[in-house]
Amino acid sequence: MILQGKTITPGIARGVTHVVDARAILATAMSVPPGESPQSELERLHAAIGRACVQLDRLQRQLMGRVAATDVAIFESHAGLLRDSQFVSRIENEIHAQSVSAEAAVSRVVTDLHATFLVNKVSLVRDKAADILDIGRRLLQCLNAAPLHDVELGPDSVVVAASLTPSELVHFAHQGVVAIVTETCGLKSHTAILARGFSIPMVTGVATACETIANQAEVIVDATGGRIIIGPDDATKQTFDVLVKKKQADEPEDSGPLPPPVTHDGVTLRLLLNISDRIEAAAVPQLGANGVGLFRTEFLYMDRPWWPTEDESYVALREVSDAMGDPATDLNVRLVDFGAEKCPAYSDIPVNRNPSLGLRGIRLLLQREDIFKPQVRAIARLARERKLTLLIPMLDTLDTLDATIEKLCQFVGVPQREQLPFKIGTMIEVPSAAILIDDLLPRVDAVAVGLNDLTQYLLAADRDDELVERYHDPLQPVVLRLLKRIVEAAETHCKPLTICGELAGDPKLTGLLLALGIRRLSVSRSSYAAVLSAIHRLSLRSIDGAADEILSLSTGAAVRRFIAEHMGS
Ligand code: PEP
Ligand code: MG
């Protein structure tokens, strides 16, 4: 059988499925051993019910107005069951009578109820069977913070899931997953960005993946073509093996650093990497990149039990720095950008009514010194050993910038910012910061334009929401005109500007970025070679004047036509 979806990360892999659907979670939970006493298991159960109700409330608030009211009501009915005294006392009885863990008791009761619902004569009740499984899954997740973080993968595992959070993706990446298939995932979401960063072939948009694909099934994931071949025959396997060998031959492992990013007419650019851990950092010397343009540090915090201490942060940063090699190479470390869907499993960050517009990035850090201070102190320690720029995530106004710089000085223990051991750069991701660029630049040493968020906020189109995917369009003239303004301001103030959103990694758009005056690009490991060869093919002379023509266009469609007709590299 072949299923078709959309490519998140191209690539091809063969493996055995690990389906993380509700049933698999319930089955695993059955064997969780009990704690010290039934009383402690009961307390855990009630705490988990409380957490699950908070989550459901959050989901309802997030979905209100976005989906039909009947769909939102499903979560209200889930919360209703969690508060239902009969349901809860059945689980309590299991814990008492059978001396089992809260996980095993939930699993037994939910499995039992699910089976009863499935054979009910009334179709309305039968339809509720899936809801019961969903409630069980949520309760189990709340019982042990995040069961997906406990999932142990076998060799050559292909994870199949309804969706994955960034922290779950990091967990599976660390376990050596060979490919991922999900039912939903925004193309510009952090989960997608991470999958690309880790070069894990990933396909999404496979509507019923968890039901259609069996656990432990042999599959080939042709992520480049967005296809999943379930139970391939011998001939297909042979074709696959030939493809993999060809790919390996095309990309010899030890090819050594690639040539520098010099255009066809001899202009030297800076091509850097976006990274999130030391494995990606090691690609800097391997590829011969000019350094790290964006280190998304929040992903260092994901696959662990609690917020790291200063020492733990320092060790993780130091590992990244060591993996990069030469301490004179550019390293732009972004302060953790938590908020929205980017939170670790143990997070105690308050839930926002509207995740993208809520407390996140630097605003959150200014309220959470317990997260902010240890990281700044760890960064300062590393900055005494190597060249480093600290990047501020989601900066909005000069007031926030002033407050941030004051805190940086206070945490590091220096009276003035000139004495900080690192340079200060800021992300330009919020339209207000982009509009204020001339006021901002004299106060910072560098800027990094995050077009993923800048596009999201400028066009009011959630980057994670597949329903508005086509509106999240960085080729809209409004985005390009604002980008040009930022580039010109950076030139005027003689401050380095790096572009590091997903657009920078698209080799078809390298010519456009160079035409707009951008000379520093930061891209994921998987896009590096393609962007580098686009740079080698391009000649700045041939695109001279193209920016004026592009910026005079008034629709995204016209920009696309212009690029296709005139800017092929
Ligand atoms: C961006 O917003 O473009 C960016 C680079 O940051 P992130 O993708 O991590 O939000
Ligand atoms: Mg961003």
Image (cartoon, rainbow, N blue to C red):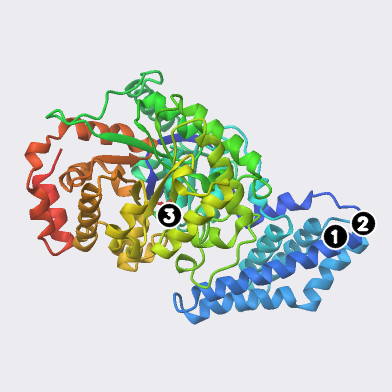
**Badge 2 local density, few (<14 within 10 Å), some, or many (20+)?**
few
Q: Which mark is residue 519?
A: none
Say if mark 3 contacts mark 2, CB within 8 Å. no
* Label 3 to label 2: alpha-carbon separation: 43 Å
Q: Is residue 121 visible?
A: yes
449 shown above or below 231: below
Residue found 70% across the figure and 63% down from its top: 139
Q: For the point 46% across and 38% down, which residue is it?
A: 198
Residue at 9% x, 60% y is: 552
Q: Position of residue 214 (x, y in %)?
A: 57, 48
Q: Amino acid at mark 1?
A: Glu
Disc 2 vs disc 1: Cβ atoms closer than 8 Å?
A: yes
Q: Quadrant of the C terminus?
A: top left
Q: Disc 2 on helix, strand or loop?
A: loop
Distance between mark 3 and mark 1 Cα atoms: 37 Å
Mark 3 or mark 2: whose residue is earlier in sequence = 2
- The disc at residue 37 is 2
| Residue 141 locus on image (x, y percent) | 68, 58
Which of 387 and 510 lies nearest the eye of the viewer? Answer: 387
Give the number of the disc on residue 189: 3
